[in-house]
Amino acid sequence: MLTPGIVAMTYMAKNGPKIVAECRLPVTAQRRGDLVVTDLAVIQPTREGLLLLELAPGVTPTQVMSATVARLLVPATFPK
C-alpha cells in the first residue's frame, strides 16, 4: 500500500492559479497527490475532477471556484 501523497501549497501564483486542468511544467512526482491542502481550501483529486472538501476560514466556495481552472466539484451538501 502506498503512503498517501499530501501536497501543501498556496492556491495562487503571481501569474494565476497553480491548480490547473493540465500540468504545463515538467512532472517531477512519481504519482499525483491524494490530497491538496492550500491557503484557500482542501481538495481531493478524483477521476471526475477536484472535490472540494474544506474551506479556509472566511473563504467561500465561489472564491475557490473563481480561482480554479480545473474542474472543481462542490458537493450539494457543502455549507455555503
Image: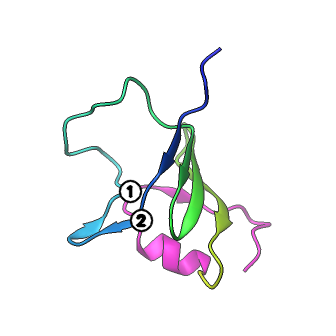
Q: Quadrant of the N terminus?
A: top right
Residue picked out by circle 2: 11
Q: Residue at x 49, y 37 (%)?
A: 33
Give the magenta-colored segment's residue range.
60-80
Closer-to-camera residue (80/31): 31
Labels 2 and 1 touching (C-beta < 8 A):
yes
Instruction: Give the residue at the far bottom of this rendering.
Output: 58
Residue 31 position within the rendered picture, expressed as x and y whole percent measured from the top left: 43, 26
Residue 44 position within the rendered picture, expressed as x and y whole percent measured from the top left: 59, 47
In the image, taking residue 29 as reference, residue 27 lies left or right, namely left
Mark 1 surroundings: few (<14), some (14-19) or many (≥20) residues within 10 A = some
Q: Residue at x 30, y 45 (%)?
A: 22
The tag earlier along the polypeptide, 2 or 1, is 2
The number of callouts visible is 2
Mark 2 surroundings: few (<14), some (14-19) or many (≥20) residues within 10 A = some
In the image, taking residue 46 as reference, residue 79 lies left or right, namely right
Q: Amino acid at mark 2?
A: Tyr
Closer-to-camera residue (61/1): 1
Residue 8 circle label: none
In terms of image quadrants, where is residue 13? bottom left
Q: Is residue 50 above or below residue 74?
A: above
Q: Amino acid at mark 1?
A: Ile
Instruction: Give the residue at the far top of this rendering.
Output: 1
SS for callout 2: loop
SS for callout 1: loop
Residue picked out by circle 1: 19
